[in-house]
Amino acid sequence: MSETIHIGPSILSADFTRLGQQLSDAEAGGADYIHIDVMDGRFVPNISMGPLVVEAARRATTLPLDVHLMMVEPENMLSAFAKAGAATIHIHWETGFHIHRTLTQIKALGCRAGIAINPHTPVGVLTEILSLVDVILIMTVNPGFGGQSLIPQTLDKIRQTRALLRRMQLPTDLMVDGGINESTAAAAVEAGANMLVGGSAVYNSQYSVQEGIARLRNAALGK
Ligand code: DX5
Ligand code: ZN
């Protein structure tokens, strides 16, 4: 497991009336990347943002933009998100008949390729495509909303995924998304995650963004 833990605030929980400031705060707080949740109202029961917001975020921060596509037919939108400034594009395994082709397209656009799996999807379905994948994104909640609780069974899947990557001797990153907070971060890292997404743990009314990131990082490191 990589010793470095990367923390990516999810702007789904940010205050959109002042998104630029919320991004600068994340950068000042030591965020490693910015996670942007794209929801289409079909794959998930919510609608959020599109390339326009990615493009605006691109102008407001120098951090890598990690774009999580929770949408059907993501292949139609890849070049729009790449042009808007995505560093990584995650597609959901559950949305594709031709995942190999779609991952190849993401790489051809010059982006890192991420494959996301829902809580019900076993990690074993990924073995044939892992050579194309830079990041596995394990959903630790059912996607669609911020502020949900981590589903405890997903911790075992993180463990299985880390074991699989070790067995296959792959340097693939292992990201977790959903319900990652001060109470769950250490368990996710212990199970093998090296990239954490934090939505409501970073953007909330209790702490500043900087403090939210610091608390999450400390918890992840077991401090
Ligand atoms: C959920 C999104 C997450 C969300 C996480 O569908 O994919 O990225 O922003 O929010 P928290 O960290 O509050 O669970
Ligand atoms: Zn997400």
Image: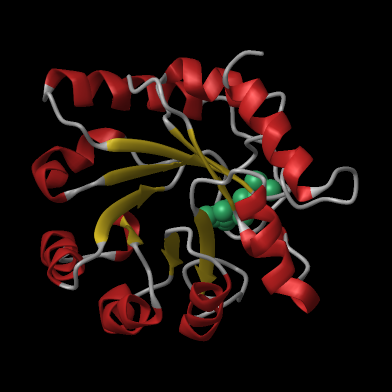
Q: Position of residue 157 (x, y in %)?
A: 39, 27
Q: Position of residue 12 (x, y in %)?
A: 65, 63
> Could you say which is closer to the camera, residue 2 or residue 172?
2
- At 58% across and 73% down in the image, what residue appears? 60
* Vertical order, 220 against 82 (above or below): above
- At 43% across and 64% down in the image, what residue appears? 67
Q: Is residue 55 visible?
A: yes
In the rendered structure, the answer to whether residue 131 lies left or right of residue 221 reads left
Q: Position of residue 17 (x, y in %)?
A: 79, 78
> Could you say which is closer to the camera, residue 96 or residue 23?
23
* Vertical order, 17 against 120 (above or below): below
Q: Count every numbered label the image shows and give the total.
A: 0
- At 52% across and 25% down in the image, what residue appears? 153
- At 39% across and 20% down in the image, what residue appears? 3
In the rendered structure, the answer to whether residue 72 lies left or right of residue 188 reads left
Q: Please state, as top left, top right, bottom left or bottom right, where the N terminus lies in the image.
A: top left
Q: Is residue 40 visible?
A: no
Q: Residue furthest right?
A: 206
Question: How was this image coloured?
Answer: secondary structure
Q: Please state, as top left, top right, bottom left or bottom right, where the C terminus lies in the image.
A: top right
Snapshot quadrant of residue 187: top right
In the rendered structure, the answer to whether residue 40 lies left or right of residue 208 reads left
In the rendered structure, the answer to whether residue 72 lies left or right of residue 164 reads right
Q: Position of residue 51 (x, y in %)?
A: 46, 82
